[in-house]
C-alpha cells in the first residue's frame, strides 16, 4: 500500500491498465507532451509512445466521436475532457452515438470507452470550468456515471471502468485532485461499479453524498457526533447505476436523510435519490428528506460568491438539524 493523492491514483490506474492491455489508449487535449492539464497522464507518452497517448485538437466532439470509432474497431479508448463543463460541446456524441452503440447495433458492437472529466468547484477556476452536470449524464440510457471520493476508489473504479464493455463517464473531483490522499494498493484491483460505500456508520440520520461532497458530509458527521448525534455517511460512488439497496437499508435504519450535491438544486441528482428513498422506504421516514445543493444560478467565478454557492458546513448541519427536529 502507498499513500497517493487522487490524481496520482488516476495516473497509477492508467499505467496499470496500459501495461496489462495493449489495446488501451489515451486521447485528449494536452494528455501527451504536457501530461494533462492536471498532470494525470504525466509520463504516459514516454512509456507507451505517441500511438497510444494521443494529443487531440481542442474539439470535444471530435475526441468522443473518434473514441466511438476506435471502440468499434477493437481499441479501448480512455478519453479525457479537460473539464466536464466543456462536455456540452460533445454531448451529442455521448448521448446519440456512444451510449447507443450496443442498442443500435443489436448487441453486435460494444463501446468500451471511458471518459475522464474533472468537475466541481472550489479552486477559483474560470467560468464553465467548475460546473457539476452529472445529473444531465445520469439521464442518458446506456451510459454509466461514476464519481469516486477517495484515491483508493479512484484507482479501483477507473480500472473497473476501462474493463467495462460499455461506456463509463468517470468524474474526478477537481478540488480533491491533490487534497484527497489515502492508502492505495500498489497492484491490480478493481472496485465494483454500482456499489455504494458506507463511509461512516451511524444510527440517527443518513448523510448521502458523492465525489467532493463526501468529505463535507464526513466533517458534518464529526460535528454531529460531538453533539451526541450518530450520523451515517453514504458515499454513492456510482450515480448510475444507483445502489438502491444500500440507500434503502441505511434510511430504513435511521429514518432521516440529507442529500448533498454541488450542482443546482432543481432537477439535480439529489432529487432522484430523494424519490428513490420515498419509493423504497417511505413508511420508515421520521422526517421529510432534505436536500443541500447549489443555487439555481450559473456557477459564479468570483471567489466570495463561489464560497457562498458551494454547500458548506452551516447549510449541511442546518438541514440535518431540521430533519432531526421534525
Image (cartoon, helix red, strand yellow):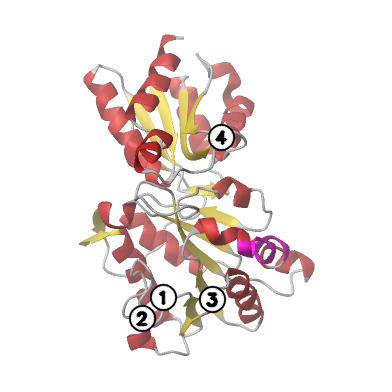
Mark 1 vs mark 3: give the one in front: 3
User: Element type at marker 1?
Assistant: helix
| Residue 202 shows up from this direction | no
List the single residue furthest toward the front.
Answer: 302
Q: Which residue is mark 4?
A: 296
Which of disc 4 and disc 1 is earlier in sequence? 1
As drawn, the label of residue 77 is 3
Q: Is 323 left, or right, of 215 in this rendering?
A: right
Pointer 1 residue: 17
- Mark 4–mark 2 Cα distance, whole angstroms, equals 40 Å
Look at mark 2 in the image and give the residue it sits on. Answer: 44
Magenta highlight: main SS:
helix
Camera-near label (4 vs 3) is 4
Q: Earlier in the sequence, mark 2 or mark 3?
A: 2
State whether residue 7 is above or below residue 225. Answer: below
Is residue 203 located in the magenta-colored stretch of the structure? no
SS for dot 3:
strand
Amino acid at each position: 500500500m502507498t499513500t497517493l493523492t487522487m490524481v496520482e491514483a488516476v495516473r497509477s490506474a492508467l499505467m496499470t491498465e496500459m501495461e496489462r492491455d495493449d489495446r488501451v489508449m489515451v486521447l485528449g487535449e494536452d494528455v501527451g507532451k504536457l501530461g494533462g492539464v492536471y498532470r494525470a497522464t504525466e509520463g504516459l507518452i514516454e512509456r507507451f509512445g505517441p500511438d497510444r497517448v494521443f494529443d487531440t485538437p481542442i474539439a470535444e466532439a471530435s475526441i468522443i466521436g473518434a473514441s466511438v470509432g476506435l471502440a468499434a474497431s477493437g481499441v479501448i479508448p480512455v478519453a479525457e475532457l479537460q473539464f466536464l463543463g466543456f462536455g456540452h460541446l460533445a454531448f451529442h456524441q455521448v448521448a446519440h452515438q456512444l451510449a447507443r452503440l450496443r442498442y443500435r447495433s443489436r448487441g453486435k458492437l460494444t463501446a468500451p470507452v471511458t471518459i475522464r472529466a474533472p468537475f466541481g468547484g472550489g479552486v477559483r477556476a474560470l467560468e464553465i470550468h467548475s460546473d457539476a452536470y452529472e445529473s444531465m449524464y445520469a439521464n442518458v440510457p446506456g451510459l454509466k456515471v461514476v464519481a469516486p471520493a477517495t484515491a483508493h476508489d479512484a484507482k479501483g473504479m477507473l480500472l473497473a471502468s476501462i474493463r467495462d464493455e460499455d461506456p463509463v463517464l468517470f468524474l474526478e473531483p477537481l478540488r480533491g485532485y491533490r487534497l484527497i490522499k489515502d492508502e492505495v494498493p500498489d497492484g491490480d484491483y478493481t472496485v465494483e461499479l454500482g456499489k455504494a460505500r458506507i463511509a461512516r456508520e451511524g444510527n440517527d440520520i443518513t448523510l448521502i453524498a458523492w465525489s467532493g461532497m463526501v468529505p463535507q458530509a464526513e466533517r458534518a458527521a464529526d460535528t454531529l457526533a460531538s453533539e451526541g448525534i450518530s450520523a451515517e455517511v453514504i458515499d454513492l460512488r456510482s450515480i448510475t447505476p444507483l445502489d438502491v439497496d444500500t440507500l434503502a437499508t441505511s434510511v430504513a435504519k435511521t429514518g432521516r436523510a440529507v442529500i448533498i450535491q454541488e450542482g443546482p438544486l432543481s432537477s439535480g441528482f439529489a432529487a432522484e435519490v430523494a424519490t428513490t428513498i420515498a419509493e423504497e422506504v417511505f413508511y420508515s421516514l421520521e422526517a421529510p428528506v432534505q436536500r443541500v445543493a447549489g443555487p439555481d444560478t450559473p456557477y459564479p467565478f468570483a471567489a466570495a460568491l463561489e464560497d457562498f454557492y458551494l454547500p458548506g458546513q452551516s447549510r449541511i448541519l442546518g438541514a440535518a438539524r431540521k430533519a432531526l427536529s421534525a
